[in-house]
């Protein structure tokens, strides 16, 4: 008896999904290595798929790389949503997300390099970290926890701090990632109007456990 899950159409859909995931994983690896100026053939070889399979999913390699970056950003953003979902104070939500992401630069260096190599896309993407930072900063402002008058500028400062922090941690592998990240987070909180003592207290709170920074979304 043929069930819905074993019908040819469903098998084809699963095969297409696996092919797309393989292409995106290959693209993410190339981005992390800073090798985006490669021929499509090299991408398909890395993904172990045929050229025709590439054309079934993407019109250009630029389209693939955009999808790869978006997948990383959105998967990690969803992970942050899950692990901070029980935190009630929006200022603490923003701080926990920033502190976790700062640590990611050392814990998940390939994912970090994808973000660093696409800094402008990090700022302007419709999904991922920037819109979530905007949401959290806006919520903290509306609740009176932050004193922010220019939301766009606040998001830009937070993103710029994250990018610079990541580069610093890569350049100085001996630097303590926890202390450095928490110090940057504390400075951002104070910039957003949180008193010094409260900012320090927020940055000393225990962080939620994160089992896998990329979850399964690195191939989303």
Image: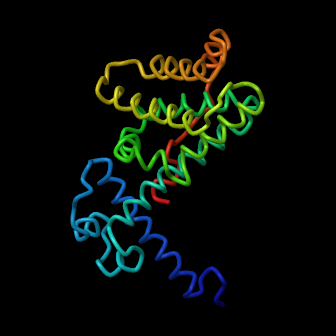
Image quarter for residue 46? bottom left
Q: Residue at left 67%, top 27%?
A: 92
Label tally: 0
Up the image or down, 214 lies above or below 21; here it is above
Q: Residue furthest bottom?
A: 1
Image quarter for residue 26? bottom left
- Residue 117 image offset from top left, x and y in percent: 34, 45
- Residue 67 image offset from top left, x and y in percent: 44, 61
Residue placed most toward the observer, 104 or 94: 94
Q: Residue furthest top?
A: 197
Residue placed most toward the observer, 72 or 47: 72
**How is the rendered protein coloured?**
rainbow
Quadrant the N terminus occupies: bottom right
Q: Residue at left 65%, top 9%?
A: 197
**198 lies left or right of 217:** right
Q: Residue at left 24%, top 53%?
A: 35
- Residue 185 image offset from top left, x and y in percent: 54, 23
- Residue 180 image offset from top left, x and y in percent: 45, 19
Q: Residue at left 49%, top 47%?
A: 214
Residue placed most toward the observer, 12 or 5: 12
**6 lies left or right of 111:** right
Up the image or down, 14 lies above or below 176; here it is below
**68 lies left or right of 141:** left
Residue placed most toward the observer, 90 or 111: 90
């Amino acid at each position: 008896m043929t069930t819905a899950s074993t019908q040819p159409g469903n098998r084809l859909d699963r095969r297409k999904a696996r092919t797309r995931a393989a292409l995106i994983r290959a693209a993410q690896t190339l981005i992390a290595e800073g090798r985006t100026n490669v021929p499509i053939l090299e991408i398909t070889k890395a993904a172990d798929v045929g050229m025709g399979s590439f054309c079934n999913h993407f019109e250009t390699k630029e389209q693939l790389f955009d999808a790869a970056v978006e997948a990383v950003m959105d998967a990690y953003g969803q992970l942050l949503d899950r692990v901070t979902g029980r935190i009630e104070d929006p200022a603490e939500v923003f701080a926990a997300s920033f502190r976790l992401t700062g640590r990611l630069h050392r814990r998940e260096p390939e994912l970090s390099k994808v973000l660093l190599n696409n800094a402008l896309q990090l700022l302007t993407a419709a999904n991922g970290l920037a819109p979530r930072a905007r949401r959290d900063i806006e919520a903290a402002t509306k609740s009176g926890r932050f004193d922010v008058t220019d939301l766009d500028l606040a998001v830009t400062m937070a993103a710029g701090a994250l990018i610079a922090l990541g580069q610093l941690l890569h350049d100085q592998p001996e630097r303590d990632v926890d202390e450095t990240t928490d110090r940057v987070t504390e400075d951002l909180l104070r910039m957003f109007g949180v008193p010094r003592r409260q900012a320090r207290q927020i940055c000393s709170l225990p962080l939620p456990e994160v089992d896998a920074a990329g979850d399964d979304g690195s191939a989303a």
